[in-house]
Image (cartoon, rainbow, N blue to C red):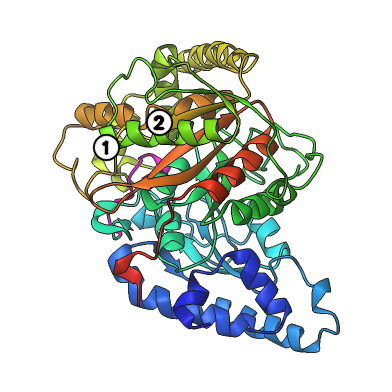
Amino acid sequence: MNSLDLAFTPALDLAQLIRNRSISPLELTQIYLKRIEKHNPQLGSFFHVATDTAIQEAKEKTEQLINTSDPNDLLPFFGVPSAIKDLNAVAGMPLTYGVAALNNNIPSYDDGVTTRMKKAGFIVLGKTATSQLGSFPYTEPPGFLPARNPWHLDYTAGGSSGGAAAAVAAGLCPVSQGSDGGGSLRGPASCCGLVAIKPARGRVSNAPVGDYQSGISSNGPLARTVADAAALLDVMSGYIPGDPYWLPSPEISFLEATKQVSPRLKIAFCDHILPFTQSEEIVKETVEKTAKLLESLGHSLEVNCLSVEALIEPFMKIWQSGIEASGMPSTMLSPLNNWFKEQSISAGEYLQAVHEMQVFSRRLVSFFDQFDVLLLPVYLHQPIKVGQWVDLSPQETLDKIINWIAPCPAFNASGLPVITLPMAQDKNGLPVGIQLVGKPADELTLIRLASQLEKNNQFSLSIPSSVNH
């Protein structure tokens, strides 16, 4: 197997190749670091590349592999490279939150999700690009390269986990951690042709920093296969003492769910989400194609369109309050984040917005008394070009964002689990994703269903031509 094939091999298969001693952690790490060196300047997928520490750890793991009598006793992802989004801490690496002035902010601790990935055997290659403070669905923070889409470099990789998505799609790492507070995993996955899982609230810990936006954000996996995403979610999941939200462990592992047959499900679907009725034609076609495939697999499908009108204003207030809560001075922020900061609200207004969000969420969760799964587009139109909205006023930009990402925030508000996977490509070669939303704490049903779709979908993505070398 050549280095290009290895770079695009699923993480689970790479772990097995290491256990078989077909490749060493050092050889594999060097392959990815060479690809990062070659392609990151055009992709902007990594803010920080931890070459020295990754090589050192890979050498140590290679030595351990040589001296291990039974490689099957090794950690599940022993020696497999990965990456951490730059909203999360990795000890000894910069933590900028997409703010260029924080390039010298070096934490001495790991976030809980980082610790879990290290304990599973992953080697951290570096920190992936994020929009400033994770605020935007495109990744173009001042002072950094924009994160570009490997399928067409003129277009965004999405945001705020745009760097992580670009890295995985371009074969700069096999899987990556990301986070989702309003579509920040699902949007980049759809833009870049990946599988993403936004877990149910409480599935993955936010330790040690906790939560300051009323539970709307979750850490989760980005991968090229459902099995890799499920296995990485197994690694990330679990209670850490002090978590404000937590869930019991599932009855089986998420990876095991990919091997099970999905039962017949009652699935609602719509190609838009009210009050937003306009979605791009390729988006409509992809949802309809997916619905027909699900029906052919024996599931019961019914058109049923949700309305998120009551959520728009309270969610926007909670989201914008995160800029003020960051404590960043105005001199360090982009003009758009500064404008968000100026819209800050009182504590009473914030609590009222949380109340309205929770009332909406109760109504939304009751929708799943009638259905097992909801099929929706991820975004209402395909990726924008890099810099496309740079000359718009802040209000115009906000309106554009709301009308693009409309199908996503409701499931952050409600804490429902969602899985995203690619189902088509548009005329520009850009992938088109759909999202499957499940009942509270029911990632298992979504993973079974997504695995069934993945196995039966005649569409498949190749390697992006921009990084096919």
Q: Which residue is mark 2?
A: 288
Q: Is 382 or 302 nearer to us in this picture? A: 302
Name the quarter where the C terminus is drawn. bottom left
Please tell me whether the stretch drawn in magenta is mainly helix, strand or loop: loop
| Image coords of residue 221 (percent x, y) | 57, 50
Q: Is residue 446 above or below residue 425?
A: above
Residue at coordinates 82% horizontally, 39% vertically from top-left? 251
Residue at coordinates 25% horizontally, 30% vertically from top-left? 400
> How far apart are labels 1 and 2 at the CA level?
36 Å
For the question of whether residue 325 can be seen, the reply is no
* Label 1 environment density (alpha carbons within 10 Å; few <14, some 14–19, many ≥20): some
Q: Which mark is residue 320?
A: none
Q: Which residue is mark 1?
A: 336
Q: Secondary structure at mark 2?
A: helix
| Image coords of residue 22 (percent x, y) | 66, 84
* Label 2 environment density (alpha carbons within 10 Å; few <14, some 14–19, many ≥20): some
For the question of whether residue 394 can be seen, the reply is yes
| Magenta part of the chain | 132-144
Q: Secondary structure at mark 1?
A: helix
| Image coords of residue 113 (percent x, y) | 64, 52
In terms of sequence position, does the residue under pointer 1 or pointer 2 come before the other?
2
Q: Is residue 26 above or below residue 375?
A: below
Q: Is residue 465 above or below residue 326?
A: below
Q: Is 249 or 7 nearer to us in this picture? A: 7
* Residue 207, picture quadrant: top right
* Residue 9, picture quadrant: bottom right
Does the magenta segment cover residue 137?
yes
Q: 333 left or right of 308? A: left
Q: 246 left or right of 147? A: right
| Image coords of residue 366 (percent x, y) | 62, 13
Q: Is residue 210 above or below residue 457?
A: above
Evaluate if marks 1 and 2 touch, with contact meaning CB atoms under 8 Å apart. no
